[in-house]
Amino acid sequence: MKLNPKDYMFEELPSYLVPDPDNGETVSSWIASMYSFTNVSRFCEITTAEMMTVEEIGKSTLLNFALNTDTGPCGFLTLLPALSGEPQKVSVVHALRQSHLWPDVYAFIGDTKPPRLPTIKLEPSNGIELYLKPSYKTYCDKHQVDTFYKSHPEDTLLPNEGKRVRRRLGSLVYIPTVWVPAFTQPLLPNQALERVNELCQMMPESSQYLFNEIREWMTAACTEVGGNGPDSGYSILTIPWRNVSIEHQFLLWAEGELVKLYPTESHQHQNSG
């Protein structure tokens, strides 16, 4: 029996990039379904083309690029402060939005099944641009990470001690939009690192350099702040996102932004009803 392009996709692309009909209209499935007839070769082309575009526009204009509603979904990896006693996890920001009513930037984080909203966080009190700008971070290298998790639980972070790497990194890192479905369910830092490495290894050798920052960011995410402060157990890349005030006007705005991003049939019916 001759396979059609969709059959090839299911064989070649990792399962977490394939739309799951049982999930219905989730953000993950919506983005993945845009590429439902894409084989690995085409997926790699789309991925590298987007990363080259991001490299061209530069970090200084990346926030404006992501806030532009015409671009649709975007992809950033972030680390949210964890609740007491819970392991810290890597989440994906698939939309950054600004309202004319509120000058702040809001991050739509993780997955959702419309019309339910995703997790929404408000930018830190000193703004989000600061966290996009690289600053020097000191962290454990790949070898240390690999060695550590051979004898330690995955839900712990590496102590910030011993021989370390010092490199300029932002606390928020851009990833290709087609990678978003791989991170809509929060992952432990080491799990997310493994997934990033798997996705990077799919790319042609000639374009591997485009993903070095993402790999390094994920490696750094496995290192804790250290010391005795209130954030001592957090990853060095944790962003102090703020909770939003859930008011009726805000909910209406957020739902409207979700419709713009993911114009599903159910949303259209909801608006016309």
Image: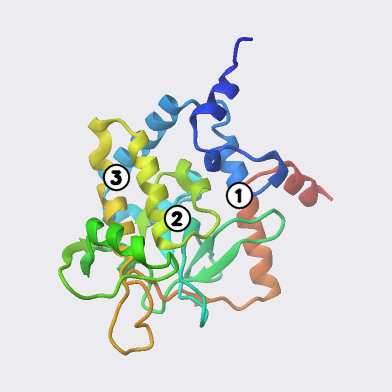
Q: Secondary structure at mark 2?
A: helix
What whole-number distance in Å separates the C-alpha atoms at marks 1 and 3?
24 Å
Question: Splitting the image into 4 quarters, where does residue 37 fall?
Answer: top right
Residue 269 is left or right of residue 34, and the answer is right
Q: Is residue 20 left or right of residue 235?
A: right
The answer to whether one can see residue 166 in this image is yes
Residue picked out by circle 3: 211
Specify the quadrant of the image occupied by residue 256: bottom right
Residue 104 percent across, percent down from the top left: 47, 71
> Along the polypeptide, which appears first: circle 2 or circle 3?
2
Which label number is shown at residue 67?
2
- Secondary element under disc 1, as helix, strand or loop, is helix
Residue situated in front as seen by the camera: 248 or 30: 30
Q: Where residue 76 appears, x then y in whole percent?
A: 42, 55
Q: Nearer the viewer, residue 68 or 89?
A: 89
Image vertical order of residue 125 relative to residue 228, above or below: above
Give the label, 2 or 1, closer to the camera. 1
Count residues near mark 1 (Cα–Cα under 10 Å), then give few for <14, some for 14-19, many for 20+: many
Relative image position of residue 132 (x, y in whole percent): 32, 62
Mark closer to the chain start, 2 or 1: 1
Q: Is residue 190 above or below residue 70?
A: below
Residue 260: image location, x then y, percent: 61, 49
Disc 3 crowd, CA 10 A, few/some/many (<14, 14-19, 20+):
many
x 31%, y 51%: residue:
214
Closer to us: mark 1 or mark 3?
A: 3
Report which quarter residue 32 is drawn in.
top right
